[in-house]
Image (cartoon, helix red, strand yellow):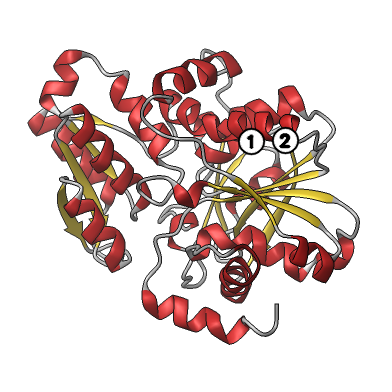
């Protein structure tokens, strides 16, 4: 299953700090409202866990990605803003850049796979981006984006391996930490989608500062396991995608932790929880039943694995990041088969 390993390149890498997150937060405060921290007493009664959901599915684009995208665009030079940007994404980074680019009057071109959820493609177009669809079986998204960088002089905004993107995503963790402190809640564990590591690494900058004794748990699809493999080897590992999954947002086509996220997280993660599609569907059903919100599969994975392993978590206070809501109706209907099971 393991294809290759990549040596750590710790030297000369500039990593964001909590000060960068605070700066990003100050800039975005007038633009994007805080997302709520929800608690369900009925979930607590059912599972014996004090679970709080950080609802980043309730941003204007329905996903956490908006903070990193806006901060990255805001940080560009005027020349870069005039030329425009390009990015590759299965959907949420795409929507975030399209929405932010519209606010900041920056042209945005997005490279998206034809297999991306229809709702994400449509939303990205509706937010004003130029969408280029490609065949992931026969074309490489990075190569297509590189062509736009070289020929049209666009600036590439990477979905997770970017200083400003990580600092922006870290706002979620800073908000969550302040909300928990206001409520005098001391969490035992944080469950956060892993993917390339942008959200997880940014979020960790606040958990490090405010909740040093809490476990940081990354959640990834069992279809790739690149974070689990990397932590096992002690270096970034590229893995093969060994099965299809509905969890598109945590299924990069070339699974390997981002360089910057890895440097931030390699000594922080307590555990990687690997989930399957049924776990994600269970999480969607649980979110609807107990919290009254809609989640996409990747965002529901944390909730699904918490339900699945709840006996090990009895009596604990747990935080899960509900990272997005952009889900097609077909998957929503599939999740209803789990509604009476959760």
Along the viewing direction, whichever of 12 and 193 lies nearer the viewer: 193
Residue 159, numbered circle: none
Report which quarter residue 173 is drawn in.
top right
Specify whether 104 is left or right of 188: left
Residue at numbered disc 2: 180
Q: Residue 50 at x, y = what percent?
A: 80, 54
Report which quarter residue 230 is drawn in.
top right
Q: Does the residue at mark 2 contact the one at mark 1 (Cβ under 8 Å)?
A: yes
User: Which residue is located at x 62 percent, y 62 percent?
Assistant: 291
Work out whether 13 lies above or below 256: above
Q: Residue 287 at x, y = what percent?
A: 60, 65
| Picture quarter with the N terminus | bottom right
| Picture quarter with the C terminus | bottom right
Q: Is residue 14 visible?
A: no
Along the viewing direction, whichever of 171 and 249 lies nearer the viewer: 171
Report which quarter residue 275 is drawn in.
bottom right
Q: How many marks?
A: 2
Crowding at mark 1 (Cα within 10 Å: few <14, some 14-19, many 20+): many
User: Which residue is located at x 55 percent, y 24 percent?
Assistant: 9
Q: Secondary structure at mark 1?
A: helix
Specify whether 238 is left or right of 283: left
Q: Residue 213 at x, y = what percent?
A: 85, 32
Q: Residue 227 at x, y = what percent?
A: 62, 48
Residue 176, numbered circle: 1
Specify whether 240 is left or right of 326: right
User: Which residue is located at x 26 percent, y 41 percent?
Assistant: 99
């Amino acid at each position: 299953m393991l294809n290759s390993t990549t040596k750590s390149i710790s030297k000369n890498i500039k990593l964001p700090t909590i000060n960068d997150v605070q700066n990003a937060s100050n800039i975005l405060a007038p633009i994007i409202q805080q997302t709520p921290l929800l608690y369900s007493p009925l979930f607590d009664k059912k599972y014996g866990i004090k679970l709080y959901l950080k609802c980043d599915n309730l941003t204007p684009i329905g996903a956490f990605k908006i903070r990193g995208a806006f901060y990255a665009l805001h940080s560009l030079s005027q020349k870069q803003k005039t030329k425009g940007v390009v990015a590759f994404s299965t959907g949420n980074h795409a929507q975030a850049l399209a929405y932010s680019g519209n606010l900041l009057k920056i042209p945005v071109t997005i490279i998206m796979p034809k297999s991306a959820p229809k709702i994400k493609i449509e939303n990205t177009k509706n937010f004003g981006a130029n969408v280029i669809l490609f065949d992931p079986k026969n074309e490489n998204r990075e190569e297509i984006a590189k062509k736009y960088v070289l020929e049209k002089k666009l600036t590439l905004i990477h979905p997770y391996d970017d200083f400003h993107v990580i600092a922006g995503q870290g706002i979620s963790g800073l908000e969550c930490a302040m909300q928990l402190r206001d409520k005098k809640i001391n969490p035992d564990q944080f469950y956060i989608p892993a993917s390339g590591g942008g959200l997880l690494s940014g979020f960790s900058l606040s958990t490090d500062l405010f909740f040093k004794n809490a476990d940081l748990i990354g959640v990834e699809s069992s279809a790739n396991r690149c974070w689990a493999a990397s932590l096992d080897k002690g270096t970034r590992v590229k893995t093969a995608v060994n099965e299809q999954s509905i969890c598109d947002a945590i299924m990069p086509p070339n699974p390997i932790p981002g360089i910057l996220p890895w440097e931030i997280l390699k000594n922080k993660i307590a555990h990687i929880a690997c989930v399957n599609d049924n776990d994600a569907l269970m999480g969607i059903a649980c979110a609807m039943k107990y919290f009254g919100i809609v989640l996409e599969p990747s965002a529901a994975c944390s909730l699904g694995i918490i339900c699945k392993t709840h006996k090990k978590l009895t009596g604990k206070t747990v935080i899960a990041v509900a990272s997005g809501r952009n889900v097609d109706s077909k998957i929503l209907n599939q999740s209803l088969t789990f509604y009476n099971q959760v």
